[in-house]
Image: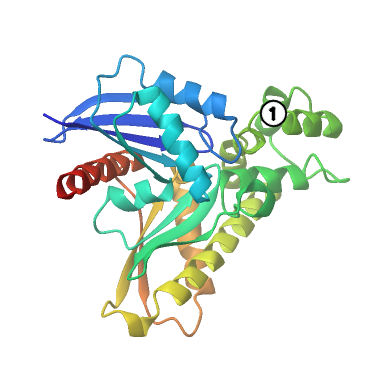
Amino acid sequence: MPTYLGIDCGGSTTRTCIVDQDGTVLHRGQSGPGNLASTPQVEIERHIRESLDTAPPTDFVAGCFAGLLTEADRIRAIALVESVTQGNTIAAFPDYRASLAASPDTDIIVISGTGALVASNTLEGVRKSGGGGPLLGDHGSAFDLGRRALAKTVLSPTRAEASPMFWETIIELFGSDEPNQILASVYRSVSPAARVAKLAQVVVMDATRGLDYARQSVDQALAHLAVTTWHHISVFHPKDSTDQSSLNLRLAGGTWEIDEGILIEEFRTQLKALKPRNVELDVNVEKLTVEPVIGATHLARELEQIHIST
């Protein structure tokens, strides 16, 4: 009986799952970051190996990677996976393909983890908006929340009020609450964005306490993500190109797991407030309930059909 391995390599975590033809889970694993653009390849390989420790052999493998941007990246990703899984039928995709494949009723996926982007299936294939990584984008991500919080507290000449837990987290992550020491720690990190993203949880907690720096950080980050989402819909899902009156938008990524009450509701609020006048479609916003790594196993199953047809 053939088996299918899905690999989901994100900015903070690498997850693997192996299923059989009946969908029975044979293995699950987890390790550190696997972003092709920001994590050293030796680290990605190590994390995939760790996540596959004691895993059985597999026949079809779909590796889904954050930071897979070019054809050269795809070839490198396939070679990397092949070195770990020893030459099975392998394909590599951007990580958002796993989220899109996870649930068949998804029209648009809005991912917010270490990074952030919007993607959807269109008549011309899968299209994405946003992203850009920590240097050029990732607005609305956990990294963005952490970056905005640092700008309002640590890097501001007048430090905004934050909770004791925030400052404890700063010292735990960076070894100091002194600005230059924090900057040195960030830029010397193997994965700087992943390090800054770890602040997101305490920032959201401070937002629920009503602290201005945190409330502003959440509002600004999600407003930017909402604008990106509407722009994506306007370009790739114009009303005259579909018979649908509404779109199913699913939220994926670790940021939405921090506190659904504040983050998802705030995102819904921002979407409603920022909806363009020329967009007639309604958007149904729900959290994706199927893990993206399961979507990666679905992509691995598709490889079998391609293999049979050729």
Residue 101: percent from the left, percent from the top? 30, 50
Colouring chosen for the image of the structure: rainbow
Residue at left offset 46%, top offset 76%: 234
Question: Which residue reaches farthest top?
Answer: 54
Q: Is residue 14 visible?
A: no
In the image, residue 5 above or below residue 151: above
Quick one: 16 or 164, which is closer to the camera?
Answer: 16
Is 249 situated left or right of 70 in this image? left
Residue 309: percent from the left, percent from the top? 16, 50
Q: Quadrant of residue 5?
A: top left
Quick one: 64 or 180, which is closer to the camera?
Answer: 64
Residue at left offset 26%, top offset 29%: 18
Quick one: 182 or 76, which is closer to the camera?
Answer: 76
Q: Give the labeled residue for mark 1.
A: 189
Q: Quadrant of the N terminus?
A: top left
Is 274 situated left or right of 286 in this image? right
Is 57 situated left or right of 111 in this image? left
Residue 31: percent from the left, percent from the top? 45, 24
- Mark 1 is surrounded, within 10 Å at the Cα level, by few (under 14), some (14 to 19) or many (20 or more) other residues, namely few
Quick one: 108 or 47, which is closer to the camera?
Answer: 47
In the image, residue 106 above or below residue 300: below
Q: Quadrant of residue 106?
A: bottom left
Residue at left offset 49%, top offset 50%: 71
Q: Secondary structure at mark 1?
A: loop
In the image, residue 200 above or below residue 270: above
Q: Is residue 17 visible?
A: yes
Question: Which residue reaches farthest front?
Answer: 310
Q: Amino acid at mark 1?
A: Ser
Residue 217: percent from the left, percent from the top? 65, 52
